[in-house]
Image (cartoon, grey):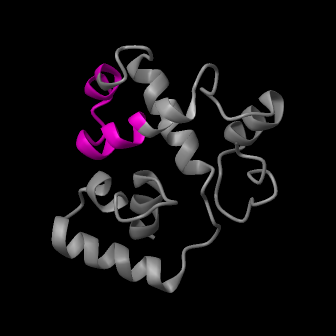
Amino acid sequence: DCTTFEKDLSVNVAPSRISTYQSKKMIPGTKNWSERLDTILLGAYDQFPSNWKKISNELGQKKTPDECRERYTALKLCNVKGRFTKEEDEKIIKGVEKYGKSWAIIAKQFINRTSKQIRDRYMK
């Protein structure tokens, strides 16, 4: 679960996301998700980055593409550690040098950051 989310707000999180967590007291998209489905979801994302229709198919269509996207995003957000470190900044720069601005590919190098977070950090 994401019990530390509200405690670690040193990163830029949209107020709407915070209120969603506060009102639901849970990760969005958690209804009927199991560890097994999470594992399949993460593996499918590695195989088909951001192709939510294919990812949904890998789950046996037990979840819609939107549910898969929301769950993946929620899982990634739960791992947010706060401000970017110098090492993370260097990893982003190396990723851009190697892959260009393919944020989904670069994000695979990070356990705790979404492609949007990485893009936004690079653009600063």
Rendering quarter of residue 95:
bottom left
The range drawn in magenta is 40-57
Left/right of residue 119 with respect to residue 54 in the rendered view: right
Rendering quarter of residue 60:
top left
How many numbered circles are shown?
A: 0
Q: What residue lies at 18% left-to-right and 65% top-to-bottom?
A: 99
* Quarter of the image where the C terminus is located: bottom left
* Quarter of the image where the N terminus is located: top right
Q: Nearer the viewer, residue 10 or 47?
A: 47
Q: Nearer the viewer, residue 111 or 36?
A: 36
Q: Is residue 50 magenta?
A: yes
Q: Residue furthest front?
A: 36
Is 75 placed above or below 123 here? above
Q: What residue lies at 39% left-to-right and 60% top-to-bottom?
A: 119
Q: What residue lies at 81% left-to-right and 57% top-to-bottom?
A: 7
Rendering quarter of residue 85:
bottom right
Q: Is residue 53 magenta?
A: yes
Residue 123, position in %: x, y? 40, 66
Left/right of residue 87 with respect to residue 84 in the rendered view: left
Name the magenta segment's main secondary structure: helix
Residue 90, position in %: x, y? 38, 82
Is 108 placed above or below 64 here? below
Q: What residue lies at 42% left-to-right and 62% top-to-bottom?
A: 118
Residue 19, position in %: x, y? 77, 36
Left/right of residue 30 with respect to residue 40 in the rendered view: right
